[in-house]
Image: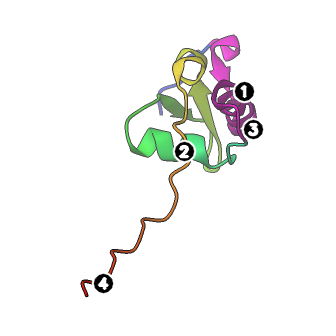
Amino acid sequence: MTMRRINLDDWYTAEEAAKRLSENSGREIDVNYPRTLVRYGKITSIDIGKRGKLYLKKDIDAYKVDVKRGRKAKKADAA
């Protein structure tokens, strides 16, 4: 396994990333949301073991979560 050195000042934990996303977006963001952003290719992460990830600060700092989407309105029945 190849070890690579990283500067921890450039990375957020999941909790820190969620807090920063909440500040950017003006609403509460779940601690699992950064993982979703990684899956969609919106931000960069690195694995730090089997259960941990770090999220790149510059990606998190630049990202703003859009307004929460609600349920779609039902179509009116044709009379």
User: Spatial distance from mark 4 to mark 2, Cα to Cα?
Assistant: 40 Å
Q: Residue at x 64, y 50 (%)?
A: 51
How packed is label 1: few (under 14 Cα within 10 Å), some, or many (20 or more)? some
The CA span between labels 2 and 3 is 11 Å
Judging from the image, what secondary structure is the residue with disc 4 in?
A: loop
**Numbered mark located on residue 35 in the image:** 2
Q: Earlier in the sequence, mark 3 or mark 1?
A: 3
N-term-proximal mark, 2 vs 3? 3
Q: Residue type at mark 1?
A: Glu
Figure check: 48 above or below 8: below
The percent coordinates of residue 35 (x first, y second) are 54, 45
Residue tagged 4: 77
**Label 3 belongs to which residue?**
15
Write the start and end of the magenta stretch as one range. 7-27
Instruction: Left or right? Give the position of 24 relative to 16.
Output: left
Judge by depth and name the residue closer to the eye, 48 or 24. Answer: 24
Residue 16 forms part of the magenta stretch:
yes
